[in-house]
Image: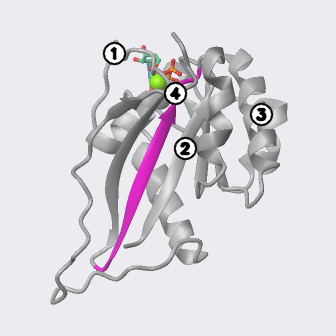
Amino acid sequence: MLSCKVVILGQANVGKTAVALRFLQDKFLEDQPATIGAAFMARNIELDQDTKVHVNLWDLAGSERYKSIAPMYFRDSDVAIICYDLTRPDTVPRALEFVRVVKETRNPPLLYIAGCKKDLVSEPYLMPESLRDYACDDHIHLLSAKKNIGVHALFEQMAEKLVRDKRIETYRMQKDVVRLTSFPEPETTTLCHPRCHF
Ligand SMILES: Nc1nc2c(ncn2[C@@H]2O[C@H](COP(=O)(O)OP(=O)(O)OP(=O)(O)O)[C@@H](O)[C@H]2O)c(=O)[nH]1
Ligand SMILES: [Mg+2]
């Protein structure tokens, strides 16, 4: 089965879970509670009739108290989506810090930067100077989970790139082949690292 591991990182309250929920269930919750530890979810993306990508998604809590667990999740991931809040320039340095540490890992994952809450900013949006390097090469996306702008496109682009660059093994669904491996239905499970004490 063609499958990939994706982690969503960024400062608390920037909208990571909202992005995950929009991708997973096409839903938005105004009163989304803060994530505790990390939440795991999974969904298939159908690129074409024959190509499906199983996305294993880890949505990490942004609170400072969980900072130390993040490397455990992005170390062996295929993709890291690093989020910041378009209405809060103070969330950019934390995003860039994640960019730096993720890039320094062995076999670094494919990196995307996501500017969240696009519905709250007026056009034209001025990209912070420090993010300009990423703005030019399709790896920065401006999203609104609330208004359903850009989220599905980001995940589709990501899946296409993984397949195109052969970062994950291609799996071709054949109508006459019975699948012996099955994945559970999309679910949301809140997990807590054993070393975290609340
Ligand atoms: N207007 C608007 N609000 C959003 C959007 N995305 C998230 N929010 C709101 O922003 C707040 C934080 O969203 P979350 O998705 O919980 O943020 P998070 O990054 O997962 O936060 P932590 O789990 O604490 O790390 C919530 O009140 C959301 O309703 C968006 O696209 N537009
Ligand atoms: Mg969250």
Q: Are marks 1 and 4 in contact (CB under 8 Å)?
A: no
Report the mark closest to the observer, 1 or 2: 2
Give coordinates of residue 118: x percent, y percent: 52, 28
Q: Which residue has dot 4 on it?
A: 194
Write the residue at 63% across / 46% down: 74
Write the residue at 59% across / 54% down: 77
Depth check: give the residue in front, 85 or 167.
167
Residue 26 in the image: above or below residue 182: above
Disc 1 marks which amino acid?
Glu
Depth check: give the residue in front, 56 or 115.
56
Please check the rendered image and state whether residue 68 is part of the magenta-colored stretch, yes or no. no
First reached walking from the N terminus: tag 1 or tag 4:
1
Instruction: Specify the segment rendered in magenta.
Output: 50-62
The local secondary structure at tag 4 comes to loop
- Residue 164 placement: quadrant: bottom right
Cα gap from disc 2 to disc 4, whole angstroms: 19 Å
First reached walking from the N terminus: tag 1 or tag 3:
1
Cα gap from disc 1 to disc 2, whole angstroms: 22 Å
Q: Which residue has dot 2 on it?
A: 7
- Residue 145 placement: quadrant: top left
Q: Which mark is residue 30?
A: 1
Q: Is residue 148 visible?
A: no
Is the shortest distance between ligand 1 and the CB of mark 1 under 8 Å?
yes
